[in-house]
Amino acid sequence: MPGVVYECDRTPLQALLPEGYEIDAATEQPTVLFEVMNLRNLPWLAGRGGHSCACSKLVADLLNFVRIGYNTWGVYVNDVVCKISAEPVKASYLLVLFENMSDPIVTGREELGFPKVWAELPDPITRDGHLVHTASWLGTEFMRLSVPDVQERPMGESPSMSARPYTMPSVEGLLHHRYVPAVGEPGKHDASYPIFVPGAGSKNPPITKYSAPTRSIQECKLQITRHPWEKLPTIHNIVNGLASLKLGRVREFAHQDIAGAGDVSGVRRL
């Protein structure tokens, strides 16, 4: 599970948040998290899908042909305050969660209100000394994360094991907004309200392995490519919105294996 945190200009980042959500005014430097997850051995998905493999593209393509892993790529704005709830809530705000399987997308949107959309998210490959993650829509690549080869480090060195100068989904919780448009009535909705998933607070995540890049984290490279409607007819507005972000230096990178995943049973409407 690699995650990279970038510093980001406030104005374009704030522009992607819905009305009623603001980056905390006390946050001097806004940040945004891009987090890729390769989930494995999930009983409710019939055990999909084996183990993640950082290998050549040819081998990865062959492995993906015989098995389907459940992979996700989330984009989170840190230090966001929800001001449309009874009491202000500060947490990380989930802008979008790309996923490569329909079942978790449908259930996550219908039951939990998560902003999930489909994308091709192959397992990472190793190329030219870098670990590479990509996101595509029917062959059109729109996001790529490349990091120098990683090597295992003591788990105590993981950023997840210490306090950060900004909020993270695993610490103070996760905000998102459920929006259900009204059928046949453009501009109207059947549901529109904030959702909160509580975090773990000071409890350390169940990390089983932590790895860090072999070189400076500033060598982590994230590319978000704009495409016209013809190339990404269902998600071009999402991708182009992300491409408008003005990303600065890398604040943090972590590549972690975590045993077990929460069932999001604590999710609630604010």
Image (cartoon, grey):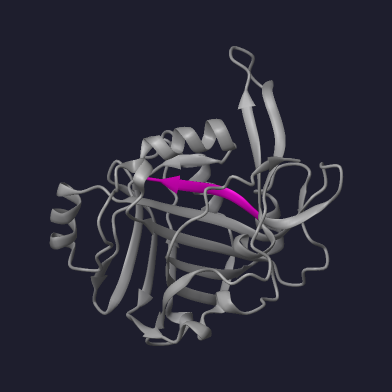
Tell me the quadrant of the picture where the C terminus can be found.
top right
Tell me the quadrant of the picture where the N terminus can be found.
bottom left
Q: Residue furthest top?
A: 184
* Left or right of residue 113: residue 137: left
Quadrant for residue 248, please give it: bottom right
* Left or right of residue 105: residue 68: left
**Residue sitting at 64 percent across and 62 percent down?**
200
**Residue sitting at 71 percent across and 57 percent down?**
91
Boundaries of the magenta span = 93-100
Q: Is residue 250 in view from this perspective? A: no
* Left or right of residue 27: residue 247: left
* Residue 66 image point, x, y percent: 15, 48
| Residue 96 lies in the magenta stretch | yes
Quadrant for residue 173, please give it: bottom right
Mostly what secondary structure, the magenta segment?
strand
* Residue 7 image point, x, y percent: 62, 71
Quadrant for residue 160, please give it: bottom right
Q: Is residue 22 in view from this perspective? A: yes
* Residue 159 image point, x, y percent: 56, 78
Q: Which sits in the foreground, 161 or 181?
A: 161
| Residue 29 lies in the magenta stretch | no
Residue 43 versus residue 260 in the image, above or below: above
